[in-house]
Image: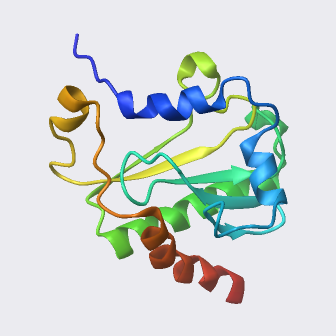
């Protein structure tokens, strides 16, 4: 059996232990979208960059409704969640020339969810050869672009949704 280790995720997991509240409820309510890496919001869903990304452009699409159960989302929330996921994928393919995309949800702590009480969809751009020895040997993940630059690159694409 092959094992894949992601030790750079430890900082994120440790940082959320013992915290009260929910980052997916708290961050949008602060109205500090740039600081909180929120790229887009409407009345039902939002897109936020992952502060501890696997790759540059790692996004999360999140419903505002605080739930861990997809069955609790309305048809309109589900439609917007997946339409925004599709739009995010197209942006990453266009702006970052992603050769592949991982799209997924971790439902429940045992499934790997760092935030297990508020469902969210991860969208991670992937490239041929984007893994190397650094995470394994040096417990270091190399992210090729600063979060601020990624935000500045992606924001105009999400702003197009507001105009349309």
- Say whether residue 104 is left or right of residue 1: right
Q: Is residue 147 left or right of residue 63?
A: left
The number of callouts visible is 0
Q: Position of residue 122 (x, y in %)?
A: 52, 46
65 to 144, vertically: above or below? above
Residue at (23, 54) in percent of width and height: 127
Q: How is the image coloured?
A: rainbow
Of 30 and 126, nearer the camera is 30
Residue pictured at 36% horizontal, 68% vertical = 93
The quarter in which the C terminus is drawn is: bottom right
Where is residue 70 drawn, in percent x and y? 74, 36
- Residue 16 appears in the picture as rendered: yes
Looking at the picture, how far across and down is residue 50, in whole percent?
A: 53, 51
Name the outermost residue toward the top.
1
The structure residue drawn at horizontal position 62% and vertical position 54%, both measured from the top left corner, is 61
The foreground one among 15 and 62 is 15
Quadrant of image for the N terminus:
top left
Is residue 114 visible to us here? no
Residue at the bottom extreme of this rendering: 163
Residue 126 in the image, given as x and y percentages of width and height: 30, 52
Task: Give the answer, above or below, for where 158 lies relative to 63.
Answer: below
Is 140 on the left or on the right of 124, as rendered? Answer: left
Residue appearing at x 73%, y 23% in the figure: 18
Which picture quadrant has residue 72?
top right
């Amino acid at each position: 059996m092959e094992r894949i280790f992601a030790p750079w995720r430890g900082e994120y997991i440790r940082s959320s232990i013992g915290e009260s509240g929910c980052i997916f409820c708290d961050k949008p309510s602060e109205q500090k979208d740039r600081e909180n890496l929120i790229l887009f919001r409407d009345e039902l869903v939002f897109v936020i960059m992952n502060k501890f990304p696997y790759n540059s452009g790692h996004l999360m699409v999140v419903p505002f409704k605080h739930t861990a159960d997809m069955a609790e989302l309305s048809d309109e929330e589900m439609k917007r969640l997946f339409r925004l996921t599709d739009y995010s994928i197209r942006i990453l393919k266009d702006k970052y020339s992603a050769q592949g995309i991982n799209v997924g949800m971790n439902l429940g702590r045992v499934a790997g969810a760092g935030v297990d009480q508020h469902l969210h969809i991860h969208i991670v751009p992937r490239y041929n050869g984007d893994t190397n020895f650094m995470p394994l040997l040096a417990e270091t993940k190399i992210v090729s672009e600063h979060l601020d630059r990624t935000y500045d690159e992606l924001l105009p694409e999400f702003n197009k949704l507001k105009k349309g």
